[in-house]
């Protein structure tokens, strides 16, 4: 279901924005555009291309007003897997949108930072089963302690 959802969201992005070839810096600038569709497209492009330079902007987008932008940001940070995103992803475990919380848990699992254990353990009580499953999966990736 998640793969289908991500595919549909990618198609939605193409339908709303259209295909355009831009530079990495242009996409990074688009992260602050007033139009959520432009921000969403930038987040996806930067994540798919694993643009490490975009991590600070993607961290900011975890606080975006738009749920789809926040979810895509958490997913992009998963793809990039940069430790600088750890604290923001821990905070995203408390987001109002369950899909953001789910992606944040997955990203924290991929990062493997032992400092994230308290936040992940706290999220085991999330009201959404999908989030709880993502948290359990994240915790199971490093059963003897997280990477330093």
Image (spheres, rainbow, N blue to C red):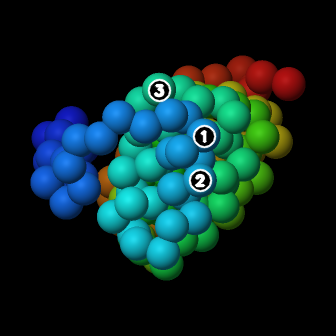
| Badge 1 element | helix
Residue at x-position 43% and y-position 37%: 22
Q: Is residue 45 left or right of residue 91?
A: left
Q: Quadrant of residue 75?
A: top left
The CA span between labels 3 and 1 is 12 Å
Contact (CB < 8 A) between labels 3 and 1? Answer: no
Label 2: which residue?
29
127 is higher (above) or lower (below) than 77? below
Residue at x-position 51% and y-position 45%: 27
Other residues around mark 2 within 10 Å, as few (<14) / some (14–19) / many (≥20): some
Label 1: which residue?
25
Contact (CB < 8 A) between labels 1 and 2? Answer: yes
Quadrant holding the C terminus:
top right
- Residue 49 tag number: 3
Q: Quadrant of residue 147?
A: top right
The CA span between labels 2 and 3 is 16 Å
Identify the mark nearer the N-term, 2 or 3.
2
| Badge 3 element | loop
**Residue 9 in sight here:** no
Give the label, 3 or 1, closer to the camera: 1
The CA span between labels 1 and 2 is 6 Å
């Amino acid at each position: 279901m998640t793969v289908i959802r991500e595919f549909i969201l990618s198609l939605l992005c193409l339908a709303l924005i259209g295909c355009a070839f831009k530079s990495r810096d242009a996409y990074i600038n688009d992260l602050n555009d007033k139009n959520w569709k432009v921000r969403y497209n930038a987040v996806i492009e930067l994540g798919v291309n694993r643009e490490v330079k975009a991590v600070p902007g993607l961290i900011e987008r975890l606080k975006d007003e738009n749920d789809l932008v926040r979810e895509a940001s958490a997913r992009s940070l998963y793809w990039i897997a940069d430790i600088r995103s750890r604290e923001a992803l821990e905070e995203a475990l408390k987001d109002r949108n369950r899909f953001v919380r789910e992606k944040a848990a997955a990203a924290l699992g991929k990062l493997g930072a032992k400092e994230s254990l308290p936040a992940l353990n706290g999220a085991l009580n999330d009201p959404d089963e999908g989030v709880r499953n993502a948290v359990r999966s994240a915790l199971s990736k490093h059963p003897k302690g997280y990477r330093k």
